[in-house]
Amino acid sequence: MLRQFPQYTSASLGHALAGLIRAGLLERSRDQDARTEAFHTWRQWHPVASFFHFSTKDSHTPADPEDSVRALRKRSRTTPMPPPEKRYPKARQISLPAPKAQGEFPQVLLARRTWRQFSRSPVEIGRLASLLSLSFGVQSWVDLWGMGRVALKTSASGGARHPIEAYLLALRVEGLPRGLYHYAAGAHRLELLRRGATGAEAIQHLNGQWWFGDAAAVVLMTAVFARTQWKYPAPRAYRAILIDAGHLCQTFCLVATWLGLAPFCTMALADSCIEAALGIDGVRESVVYAAGVGTPPHGSKWAPWPTRAYGTHRPNPVW
Ligand SMILES: Cc1cc2nc3c(=O)[nH]c(=O)nc-3n(C[C@H](O)[C@H](O)[C@H](O)COP(=O)(O)O)c2cc1C
């Protein structure tokens, strides 16, 4: 080929081919084999769960909060918002005693909010360690007679499969260099995957949500599908994976609140970009959810709305 087109060097051809591969127009047969093999691991859940998983990958371009509220206000003029609760007014009504709201536990539950503004103060590594351990750490192991062992954590997990892994993008953690880490849930250790991390990178991973750029740390939750697929051949088990992630995330937000931190969760993610950063294939292991934490802005008792779109005088704690 090079003899026929002397104007091309092997370097320039290699460069062009790499571009076509990056654009998805060409596939290396080696890559294709690896991908086909990886997709094969989903065979029992095909096509129901795999279609849902792969066709809903990568969030759409985010709307700025102001645009999104404007669009919803317009929609509500033609299509009213559905009522936020259900009632049976004709049914006999039984009043209940007032809920017990005193004590540390209910106070933590009541204090939890989604935060979208943070101070520049770092989170100490001790608090981050407690947060990781009490949310994602293995609390004990159970032996499954000749099959191996399964983990128990502070959150429930369908079939005790615990398919969720936690990766940490450390941005402002006192005593921990910025970087991308994997949380080894059994050993309670951080495994450094790459040095260096920026707020801009966090925003990119969180699909352009600039209001999370000042977070001190972001936790990217991935699912290792084989753990669940091994036990449950029916595609309904895919639901358990997403629900498991929700359990862990709520625990994370509550523990963070208890530690005096400002947590958030988001599923507006740039999945492919995160998976490339983590070095995972997106098929056997894929990102499903993210949470993060910062320190609350000085003097604020309530999670303030991001200021870039609204100005400080327009608090609106609901997204
Ligand atoms: C599954 C899920 C996805 C969410 N995704 C986002 C998101 O992409 N961006 C964001 O700013 N908040 C996100 N949130 C936070 C919600 O907007 C927030 O929980 C809601 O407004 C209620 O406020 P509260 O958490 O303070 O009670 C998400 C929450 C959940 C449970």
Image: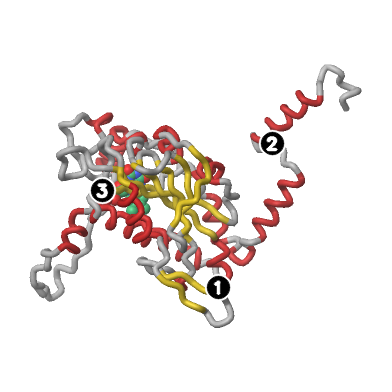
Badge 3 element: loop
Along the line of sight, the residue nearer the viewer: 18 or 68: 18
Find the residue positioned furthest to the front: 175
Count of numbered marks: 3
Q: Nearer the viewer, mark 3 or mark 1?
A: 3
Amino acid type assigned to the residue bearing label 3 in the image: Leu
Quadrant containing the N terminus is top right
Amino acid type assigned to the residue bearing label 2 in the image: Ile
Depicted 90 relative to depicted 271: above or below: below
Find the residue positioned furthest to the bottom: 145
Badge 2 element: helix
Quarter occupied by residue 4: top right
Question: In the image, residue 287 lies at what x, y percent?
Answer: 49, 51
Q: Nearer the viewer, mark 2 or mark 3?
A: 3
Q: How far apart are marks 1 and 2 (CA)?
A: 36 Å
Quarter occupied by residue 84: bottom left
Question: In the image, residue 24 lies at what x, y percent?
Answer: 66, 38
Badge 1 element: helix
Along the line of sight, the residue nearer the viewer: 45 or 85: 45
Which label belongs to residue 261? 3
Q: Distance between the residues labelled 3 and 1?
A: 37 Å
**Label 3 lies in ligand 1 vicinity (Cβ under 8 Å):** no
Which label belongs to residue 21? 2
In the drawing, does residue 207 fall left or right of residue 75?
A: right
Which label belongs to residue 231? 1
Q: How far apart are marks 2 and 3 (CA)?
A: 43 Å
Bin the neighbour count of mark 1 within 10 Å (Cα to Cα): few under 14, some 14-19, many 20 and up. few
Question: In the image, residue 250 lies at what x, y percent?
Answer: 32, 58
